[in-house]
Image (cartoon, rainbow, N blue to C red):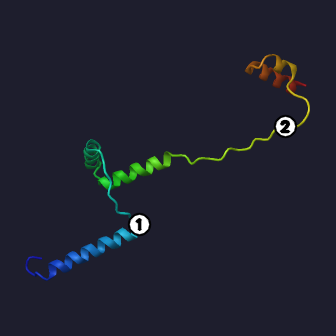
Amino acid sequence: MRGDPERGPALLDKIAQLSQQTKKRDNLMQTIIELNDEIFKQSQRLAERERTTLNRLIEEALALRLSLSTPKQRPVALPIYQGSGGLSPSVVDSLTNRALLEAADDVVNR
């Protein structure tokens, strides 16, 4: 670049063009974010320790957070039994797990 002054700007243009192509190919969005100073410093140190970029670290953090969020689900309509009968007397008398298990055993053993 030093020997040919015309080559410098052309080379810089080529680098910028390749950079834009890479961004388009990788489907990248360029944006500005504001971070708390201490979080930024800690993030930079972590990125250095893990030999990665701050961008990649932020992408991973966002991807993790997004994967943890659960979409709201519609309530499910549960069927209501419209038949006759009801709970056996042993269940009605004492609504405990033991009573329910004994009532189930009674039905199975019949």
- Tell me the kind of residue under disc 1: Asn
- The residue lying furthest to the top in this view is 93
Labels 1 and 2 touching (C-beta < 8 A): no
Vertically, is 2 above or below 57? Answer: below
**Residue bearing the label numbered 1:** 27
State the separation of the CA atoms marked 1 and 2: 53 Å
- The residue lying furthest to the left in this view is 3
Name which residue lies at 30% across and 53% down. Answer: 54
Q: Along the horizontal axis of the image, is 81 left or right of 37?
A: right
Q: Position of residue 46 (x, y in %)?
A: 28, 45
Find numbered disc 1 in the image and state the secondary structure of the residue it sits on. Answer: loop
Vertically, is 28 above or below 104? Answer: below
Name which residue lies at 39% across and 48% down. Answer: 61
Q: Position of residue 21 (x, y in %)?
A: 34, 73
**Residue bearing the label numbered 2:** 81
Q: Along the horizontal axis of the image, is 80 left or right of 3?
A: right
Camera-near label (1 vs 2) is 2
Q: Along the horizontal axis of the image, is 69 left or right of 41?
A: right
Find numbered disc 2 in the image and state the secondary structure of the residue it sits on. Answer: loop
* Quadrant in the picture for the N terminus: bottom left
Q: Position of residue 103 (x, y in %)?
A: 83, 22
Vertically, is 21 above or below 101? Answer: below
* Quadrant in the picture for the C terminus: top right
Pick the residue in front: 99 or 95: 95
- Tell me the kind of residue under disc 2: Tyr
Name which residue lies at 25% across and 73% down. Answer: 15
Task: Estimate how packed mark 1 is, as few (under 14), some (14 to 19) or many (20 or more) residues with alpha carbons within 10 Å.
Answer: few
Tell me which corner region of the image, top left, top right, bottom left or bottom right, holds residue 10: bottom left
Q: Earlier in the sequence, mark 1 or mark 2?
A: 1
Task: Estimate how packed mark 2 is, as few (under 14), some (14 to 19) or many (20 or more) residues with alpha carbons within 10 Å.
Answer: few
Name which residue lies at 29% across and 44% down. Answer: 36
Pick the residue in front: 82 or 51: 82
